[in-house]
Amino acid sequence: MRKNTAKGECLDLAREKKQKSPKNKEFEKLKEGLKNRFVNTAHIMWGRDLNELTPTEIYQTVAATAKQYISDNWIKTNRTYGEREEKQVYYFSIEFLMGRLLKANLINLGIEEAVKEVLDDFDLDLLKTYEEEPDAGLGNGGLGRLAACFIDSMAAHRLPGHGCSIRYQYGLFEQKIIDGNQVEIPDNWLRDGFAWEYRKPDKAVDVKFNGHAYMKEMEDGSLKLVYENPMTVMAVPYDVPIVGYHNNTVNTLRLWNAEVNRDFSDYGMLTQEQMRQKNEYRLFVESITRYLYPDDSTYDGRRMRLIQEYFMTSAGVQSIVRHYKKTGMDIHDFGQKIAIHINDTHPAVAVAELMRILVDEEGLEWNEAWVITRSTIAYTNHTIMPEALEKWPVDMFRTLLPRVYMIIDEINRRHLEEVRERYPQDEGKVRALSIIEDGMVHMARLAIVGCHSVNGVAKIHSDILKTTTLRDFCEYNPKMFNNKTNGITHRRWLMGANPELANLIDATIGSRRWHRHPEQLDLLNDYVDDKPFLAELGKVKRLRKVALAEYIKEHNHIEVDPDSIFDIQVKRIHSYKRQLMNILHIMYQYNKLKTDKSYDMLPTTYIFGGKAAPGYYIAKETIRLINAVAAKVNNDASIKGKIKIVFIENFGVSIGEIVYPAADVSEQISTASKEASGTGNMKFMMNGAITLGTLDGANVEIREAVGGDEHCVIFGLRAEEVLTYYATGTYSAWDEYNTNPQVRLVVNQLVDGSYGDFHSLYDYLLHANDEFFILKDFNAYAEAHEEIMRRYKDKYNWLKSSAMNIANSGCFSSDRTIDEYANEIWQVKPVMMS
Ligand SMILES: *Cc1c(COP(=O)(O)O)cnc(C)c1O
């Protein structure tokens, strides 16, 4: 057994233990200070005594108190970055799915325990107070959550890295299930204000749309840009502090809000027509940052989305350049001092916007500006699905952004000149590599041409990208392509969401160093055969399952047995994620229980959660089917509770914090090749669930990390097989249906009234030829479930697998991911705060 005797680690442990110990002097001082600030803050904010405040007001008071511990370090951090002229990273993402911030901030500040005790003294409950905070749901799912994990990790590693996004007035809709159907309710998350934001009107910038742009020849023969009659929108930043873990670093997430121009309120003498125009303008401006688009994969004909993209990107890039110039550094060094990362293509227009600023406003030569732009920008691709690659009609683009379009056209002209030199007489290549093709502006192509690094988000995804979706670009410039496997912040998803497990790990390995160095979770590998440890691990898992069972009792009014297998699939509802396969399999198991008296099934609770895009019919029908099957199966006493099905409403970050830690089985069953990475899979793994999955996305690396198939259950088609089927068009869902009686039975039950009328899904599977191979993978999936049950019966080995998953999950911390971005893409170094 490895003994952890390094002196530094023991000291570290002792020091952190001491900080927590209530008898410690320093801790008492911290508490005293907190208490004074808390009471004063309550008086200042509300003009009332503490005991008169509502729970929401208590929350706001605690948040305001915490902000006092943040603001000094925020100011210091910004000053330090400026004085030392440190290279800065800006992570542009149209979504940041932050969730709640109070607990994360208290943990990162290292004052959670002290705050808890102060509140205790006033008979207030910190855990209940956390619940008062609305989720900042400024994202759809994985992509937005990734951005949130990344800024947490950047601050934790003292990297000068900031976020740039939109301050949506309404986040992703709130989901209610009514009569089994999804109903969408606007998410008015700002109703009681957002405690963590700081409005910065003095840092507003103008963003211009429409109008008429052209080059005019000057008297000296030079060309000058003229941009007439643009519509100007004021972008006002709201800054949110991003607190580093125990390190005094506080970075910034800048959220842009669209507002009417400064001189708007100057009504003066207006004709009715002018008045009408003014009102129209106001309505337009106010609509720009009102809604988050509730669809993270397809973008058909939505001009407002393009407006949002340019609004955020232009405001972000302008403010970066403005701040850069204020530091007095030379614009020619911009690429050495600034890294701009674009999370998917939504901010890809940054390429043209930075060119516009450098050429039109800073007066640089085109070639100079181009070198700077390419060395500044890097791009992450999130999908190989061609239908999800963003493109915009040229007409729409040119009308909305006339000058930006001119620049893209010129970028493309010069780019294609080079392409033609490389591939003379190959117009096929030229078309494939052209940013503008068939009347569309291809945003991924713009991003690739205008940046120096393109990365995928898991090994298999990066490989497939290079051989399929981006093949021509990879052949053209292979050096720029690389992989950065996604990660999740273990501070939120393990330490925050599962403190009992975190404590058990601390006690077991006798060190808390993994809090800062998650790769040290691998010290747990010494204990995966340790019976007392496994027994404790089993207790912790049961605790989390009881907590989820209570949540389900309260919200779904369903009793579930914490000793049953908790088999969980929570994520956006999407055909390729195959929630439909999951529920069809449950129907199959239920049939088997009803007809085969000898079927020996372990009691299983199947838990679903996730939102469907409002216009996504098949996804919504899948939700309806899950609830229809649940209604029948949950109430059939004859199966003695062997199957329970629960659909958890309104899945989001905060509900995820309850759900992920409670899983025995993590359902990661996307059609191989379709899930770029997944990050839910990592959250489950880190909390000790066994992955039941396809060889897709990061599942491949999870399997590698746990040492192969002994500690995960892999099934189904491989990516190459799927891609071959697509290429040859040889898959036939009808063949599966005709030759596989198990498949035929459940598919027939979609239309024979067993659960109501689901012709929608029946047609989807058969007439639309089952585009994601649900029927093809069905038997393998059923067998994988049998394997899960065989393993679960062996309690000891199950717990060992669970421990193996936790012990080897350190590489899926976003701290590891961010270090790779910092070293291999951005070339930024940590900055120590005094
Ligand atoms: C992690 C997370 C996701 C991503 O889940 P996948 O299983 O990777 O699709 C989506 N939504 C929320 C709220 C999350 O926390």
Image: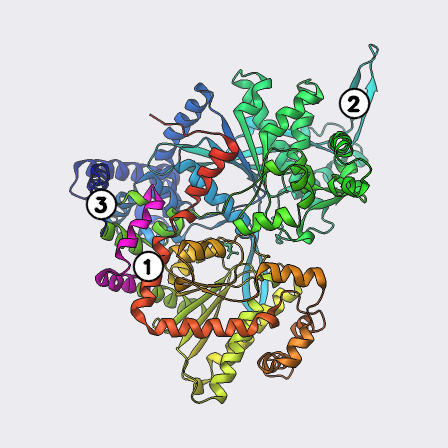
- Give me the residue at 28% from left, 38% from top: 34
* Viewer-closest of 329 and 31: 329
* Viewer-closest of 162 and 194: 162
**Residue 445 quadrant:** top right
For badge 2, the amino acid type reads: Val
Q: Is label 1 or label 2 in front?
A: 1
The furthest residue to the top: 220
In the rendered view, would you say 360 is above or below 589? above
For badge 1, the amino acid type reads: Ala
Q: Are marks 3 and 2 in contact (CB under 8 Å)?
A: no
Tag of residue 177: none
Residue 771 appearing in the image: yes
Label 3's element? loop
Left or right: 224 in relation to 124: right
Q: Position of residue 108 (x, y in %)?
A: 35, 41
Is 184 colored magenta in this rendering? no
Label 3 packing within 10 angstroms: few (<14), some (14-19), many (20+): few
Tag of residue 4: 3
Overall secondary structure of the magenta section: helix
Label 1 packing within 10 angstroms: few (<14), some (14-19), many (20+): many
What stretch of residues is rendered in magenta?
Answer: 515-541
CA distance separating discs 3 and 1: 18 Å
The C terminus, quarter of image: top left
Q: Is label 3 or label 2 in front?
A: 3
CA distance separating discs 1 and 2: 65 Å
| Residue on which the image places disc 1 | 803
Q: Position of residue 534 (x, y in %)?
A: 26, 62
The furthest residue to the left: 23
Q: Earlier in the sequence, mark 3 or mark 2?
A: 3
Q: Earlier in the sequence, mark 1 or mark 2?
A: 2
| Residue on which the image places disc 2 | 226
For badge 3, the amino acid type reads: Asn
